[in-house]
């Protein structure tokens, strides 16, 4: 045991003698045991580089990229708010088509159904395996009565235990999800009076 302590003391003295104490100044470059990526290969802006086909280090942004500091177009479509106000839009500012609903169903199943369930009733896989005890039932009266813009806002920024999906889901797909959610709610809470007259007979069969 005493040999271990002796070796430990000698090693400590050696490290102190070589590296010095923390905060001391010296003209000699520091000893870096872990450089922590202080020096690494990188591309210098506006310099030639053979890595890219055009030979430039600075590349044009990916289509759709918004540079930091650029003004993002603030319209009811991009924000879910009435133009110039903090009020949410009542109905989604896009035309509802079969293609939109199909896209909304696809995006809903990917992003929303793990928690809210395929039917939107809050019985997704995360609840079944116990990962989340409380998940909102999207057919609750409180959510059904929300404005479309507020649902869009919740998808974008999250709310309570729900995280934001603005970075994962495009603006167009967020509105598609809202449209599909409304169709889910209508299928669950709708009445026969909501069905067009020519289609009612087929439902009774």
Image (spheres, helix red, strand yellow):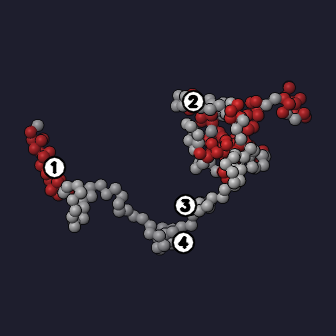
- The reply to whether callout 1 and callout 2 are in contact (CB within 8 Å) is no
Residue projecting furthest to the front: 85
Residue 119, horizontal then vertical, whole percent: 68, 32
Residue position for label 2: 134
For mark 4, what is the residue? 54
Q: Residues within 10 Å of mark 1 (few under 14, many from 20)?
A: few
Mark nearest the camera among 3 and 4 is 3
| Earlier-in-chain disc, 3 versus 2 | 3
Secondary structure beneath disc 2? loop
- Residue 38: name its quadrant: bottom left
Specify the label residue 68 is tagged with: 3
Residue 189, horizontal then vertical, whole percent: 76, 30
Choose the circle earlier in sequence order: 1 or 2. Answer: 1
Q: Secondary structure at mark 3?
A: loop
Q: Are marks 3 and 2 in contact (CB under 8 Å)?
A: no
- Whether the residues at callouts 1 and 3 have beta carbons within 8 Å, the answer is no
Q: Which mark is nearer the camera, 4 or 1?
A: 1
- How far apart, in angstroms, are the residues tagged by discs 1 and 3? 48 Å
The reply to whether dot 4 and dot 2 touch (C-beta < 8 Å) is no
Location of mark 1 (residue): 12
Image quadrant in which the N terminus is located: top left
């Amino acid at each position: 045991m005493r040999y271990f302590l002796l070796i430990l003391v000698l090693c400590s003295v050696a490290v102190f003698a070589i590296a010095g104490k923390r905060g001391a100044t010296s003209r000699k470059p520091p000893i870096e045991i872990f450089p922590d990526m202080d020096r690494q290969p990188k591309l210098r802006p506006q310099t030639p580089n053979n890595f890219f086909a055009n030979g430039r280090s600075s590349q044009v942004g990916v289509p759709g990229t918004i540079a930091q500091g650029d003004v993002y177009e603030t319209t009811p479509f991009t924000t879910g708010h009435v133009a110039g106000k903090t009020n949410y839009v009542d109905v989604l500012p896009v035309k509802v088509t079969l293609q939109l609903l199909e896209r909304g169903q696809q995006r809903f199943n990917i992003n929303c159904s793990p928690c809210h369930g395929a039917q939107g009733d809050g019985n997704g896989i995360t609840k079944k395996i116990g990962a989340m005890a409380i998940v909102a039932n999207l057919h609750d009266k409180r959510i059904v009565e929300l404005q479309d813009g507020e649902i869009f806002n919740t998808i974008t920024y999250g709310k309570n235990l729900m995280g934001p999906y603005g970075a994962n889901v495009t603006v167009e797909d967020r509105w598609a999800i809202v449209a599909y959610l409304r169709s889910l709610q209508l299928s669950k809470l709708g009445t026969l009076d909501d069905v067009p007259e020519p289609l009612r007979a087929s439902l009774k069969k």
